[in-house]
Image (cartoon, rainbow, N blue to C red):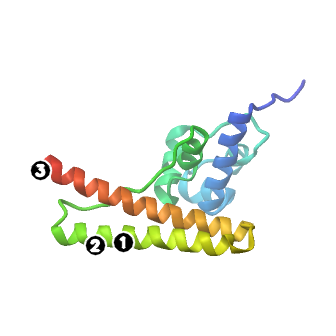
Amino acid sequence: MTEPTLTQSERAIKLADRDLIAAAGGIAAVAAHFLFQSTSLVGRWHSVTEPKFMPSPRRQDLEDLVGPVATRAAALRQGFTLVKLPEGGTPSAHDLHTTIAQHSRCANEVTSELVADLADGVIDPAETARGIAKCDASIEQLIALRTFLQQIAETA
């Protein structure tokens, strides 16, 4: 009997589940301490060639522990990214000023670091990873600002 072949999308799901299981401590830890499933079953979920997929409720249980590892990968496959929304109630004027300043600082850091990285005409993998992290931080600040403005609009 031939092994079923996973599609590229299915393989991406399996890779994300593997990363999720690893982030939660590995197959044995996940099986014994978090999901109370057999090690062999969690191993099949972890395998990128095994056609057995982790059920969504179990994936959510793990993501509640370690963050949206698989959800972030699923969003990227669809051309989206996840950004954590700020917590808390209605912002004060001070919160808005602080958020505007933080976003401005982050955006300036992204720009100045990318310009410095391009000085030699090449962006290496470390510079790329650092640039992506800085962009993500700037996006989070901008989303925080947008969320604050939305909260103000809803209370007006």
Give the residue at the far top of this rendering. Answer: 1
Give the label, 3 or 2, closer to the camera: 2
Q: Secondary structure at mark 2?
A: helix
- Going 72% across and 39% down the picture, which residue do you hit? 11
Give the residue at the far left of this rendering. Answer: 156
**Image check: 4 left or right of 45?**
right
Q: Amino acid at mark 1?
A: Gln
Disc 3 to disc 2, C-alpha distance: 20 Å
Mark 1 Cα-neighbour bin, 10 Å: few <14, some 14–19, many ≥20:
some
Q: Quadrant of residue 148?
A: bottom left
Q: Taking 139 as reference, is 4 above or below it?
A: above
Q: Secondary structure at mark 3?
A: helix
- Going 38% across and 63% down the picture, which residue do you hit? 141
Residue 98: which numbered mark, if any?
2
Q: Earlier in the sequence, mark 3 or mark 2?
A: 2
Q: Which residue is mark 3?
A: 155
Q: Taking 83 as reference, is 8 above or below it?
A: above
Q: Amino acid at mark 2?
A: Thr
Give the label, 1 or 3, closer to the camera: 1
Mark 2 Cα-neighbour bin, 10 Å: few <14, some 14–19, many ≥20:
few
State the residue in front, 47 or 76.
76
State the residue in front, 38 or 94.
94
Q: Does the residue at mark 1 contact the one at mark 2 (Cβ under 8 Å)?
A: yes
Disc 1 to disc 2, C-alpha distance: 6 Å
Q: Taking 150 as reference, is 29 above or below it?
A: below
Q: Which residue is mark 1?
A: 102
- Going 72% across and 67% down the picture, which residue do you hit? 123
Disc 1 to disc 3, C-alpha distance: 24 Å
